[in-house]
Image (cartoon, helix red, strand yellow):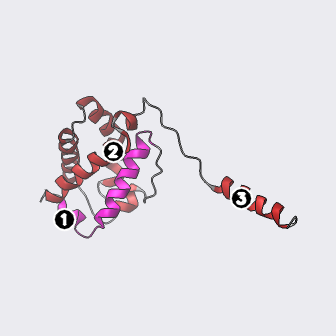
Amino acid sequence: MKMLLPGLIAIVLAACAAVPEKKSVDSNALYSRLGGAAGVEAVVDAALRRIHGDLRINIFFEKSDLADVRRLLIEQICAATGGPCTYSGRSMEEAHSGMNLTDQDFDIFVEDLVAAMTEVKVSPELQQELLALFGPMRPQVVGQ
């Protein structure tokens, strides 16, 4: 029994060391000002409803696993806005490869996102902050 105890302690300590530390969230981070997890989820859910109903771009999501798209959008927005998430998806180039999206397609997505943020009462200032984080992704999405 005495021989077993040090081994068990070593295993427990190794397991504790392997658990990733949870990121703390600055109360001034955009993530917090959006309402944290609930706020990000509300934006994503409203955006996906709008995109699903938008005949101009919903075809691009036709063969997508919408639950997975939802999860990845939540992760991406959460991580980009200073939340405790890590984005686990593919790069924007990989995710949009072969889709041949145009600037107009990108603009329609942004239009639906803005309408969704307005619907869930995200202030225009916070909307601009969020859009400023994702606007630079245009070249990684368009023309892939």
Q: In which quarter of the image is residue 91?
A: bottom left
Local SS, label 3: helix
Residue 78: mark? none
> In the image, is 114 to the left or to the right of 26?
left
Query: Label 2 neighbourhood size at 10 Å, few (<14), some (14-19), many (20+)?
Result: few
Going by the numbered disc 1, the residue's amino acid type is Ile
Query: Residue 51 at what x, y percent from top left?
Result: 19, 55
> In the image, is 73 to the left or to the right of 117?
right
Residue at 28% across, 50% down: 44
**Residue denoted by label 3:** 12
Residue at 44% across, 31% down: 27
Q: In which quarter of the image is residue 82?
A: top left
Local SS, label 2: helix
Label 3, label 2: how many angstroms apart (C-alpha)? 34 Å
Going by the numbered disc 2, the residue's amino acid type is Ala
Going by the numbered disc 3, the residue's amino acid type is Val
Q: Quadrant of residue 119?
A: top left
Q: Is residue 76 magenta?
A: yes
Q: Do the residues labelled 1 and 3 touch (CB within 8 Å)?
A: no
Range of magenta residues: 58-83
Residue 38: mark? 2
Dominant secondary structure of the residues highlighted in magenta in the image: helix
Marked residue nearer the N-terminal end (1 or 3): 3
Residue at 48% across, 50% down: 86
**Residue denoted by label 1:** 59
Q: Is residue 89 magenta?
A: no
Q: Which of marks 1 and 3 is in front?
A: 3
Q: Can you name the residue that lies furthest to the bottom here?
A: 63
Q: Nearer the viewer, residue 83 or 94?
A: 83
